[in-house]
């Protein structure tokens, strides 16, 4: 069965173009003109991935994400034309698994879609729980607990933490973490290291909030990041 994508954008020309291209890539594609319509579509059928514009009438992409994350952990790729929106997406944890700035090439879009879907499928295929100190990662349920408290992470943050836990205290460079988070999406290894830093910042804050301020992710300056031995201090 074809994987199901939902494209949410108020520009009919863009939604029609994306639908035609992605259908030619073998996906089943639905479209919605704004967040309100998108929520109705999701109530009828939960997609495997959502491509989401930011600026839309009635309910914009940020408002839609707040509603979506109350019930579902569907991966989302934001589509944005403004650099200040990129700062919001990376800096304030709106739940984006990835983002593309307009204009973008169709080949880059297809690569990002494949990377996010593959990452989701890989996590589902490993039905196991891994632990590092006070941190527990349940791959099959996409759940993370710290000191038995549930932590609400985006899929990208989940993948980042999963990589650090699997590394067993070894330092992972930013390019290594980008590869783990976004796979073979073109361009991610060049100029996107600040994306890793932003996700690490969000991950640290969320873990610390549930663990009385403990710091779990350590910066090794000039090299990358690692999980602190014993799971935090």
Image (cartoon, helix red, strand yellow):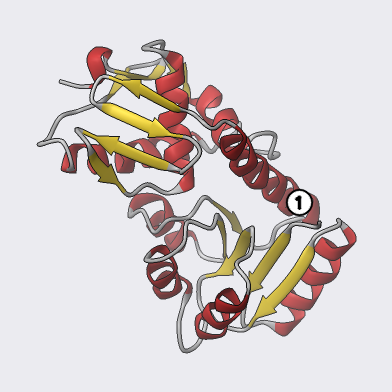
Image quadrant where one finds the N terminus:
bottom right
Q: Does residue 87 lie above or below 81 as drawn?
A: above
Q: Does residue 145 lie above or below 94 as drawn?
A: above
Left or right: 87 with respect to 216? right
Foreground pick, 71 / 52: 71
- Label 1 crowd (10 A; few <14 / some 14-19 / many >=20): some
Q: Where is residue 63 in the image (x, y as percent from the top left)?
A: 40, 74
For label 1, the SS is helix
Residue visible at 45% across and 33% down? Answer: 160
Foreground pick, 89 / 142: 142
Q: Residue furthest right?
A: 24
Q: Where is residue 11 in the image (x, y as percent from the top left)?
A: 67, 82
Residue visible at 43% across and 39% down? Answer: 158
Q: Mark 1 points at which residue?
A: 110
| Quarter-of-image position of residue 188 | top right
Foreground pick, 216 / 187: 216
Residue visible at 50% across and 39% down? Answer: 140
Q: Position of residue 88 (x, y in %)?
A: 38, 59
| Quarter-of-image position of residue 24 | bottom right
């Amino acid at each position: 069965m074809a994987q199901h994508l939902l494209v949410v954008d108020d520009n009919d020309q863009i939604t029609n173009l994306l639908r035609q291209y992605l259908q030619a890539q073998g996906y089943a594609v639905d479209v919605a003109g704004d967040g309100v319509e998108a929520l109705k579509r999701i109530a009828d059928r939960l997609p495997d991935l959502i491509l989401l514009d930011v600026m839309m009438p009635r309910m914009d992409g940020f408002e839609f994400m707040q509603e979506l994350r109350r019930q579902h952990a569907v991966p989302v790729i934001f589509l944005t034309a403004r650099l200040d929106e990129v700062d919001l997406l990376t800096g304030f944890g709106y739940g984006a698994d990835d983002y593309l700035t307009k204009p973008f090439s169709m080949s880059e879009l297809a690569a990002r879609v494949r990377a996010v879907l593959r990452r989701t499928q890989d996590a589902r295929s490993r039905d196991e729980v891994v632990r590092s100190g006070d941190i527990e990662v349940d791959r099959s349920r996409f759940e993370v607990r710290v000191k038995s408290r549930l932590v609400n992470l985006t899929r990208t943050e989940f993948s980042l933490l999963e990589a650090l836990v699997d590394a067993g205290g070894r330092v992972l460079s930013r390019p290594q973490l980008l590869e783990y988070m976004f796979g073979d999406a073109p361009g991610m290894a060049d100029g996107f290291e600040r994306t890793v830093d932003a996700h690490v910042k969000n991950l640290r804050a969320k873990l610390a909030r549930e663990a009385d301020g403990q710091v779990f992710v350590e910066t090794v300056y000039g090299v990358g990041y690692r999980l602190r031995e014993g799971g935090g201090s």
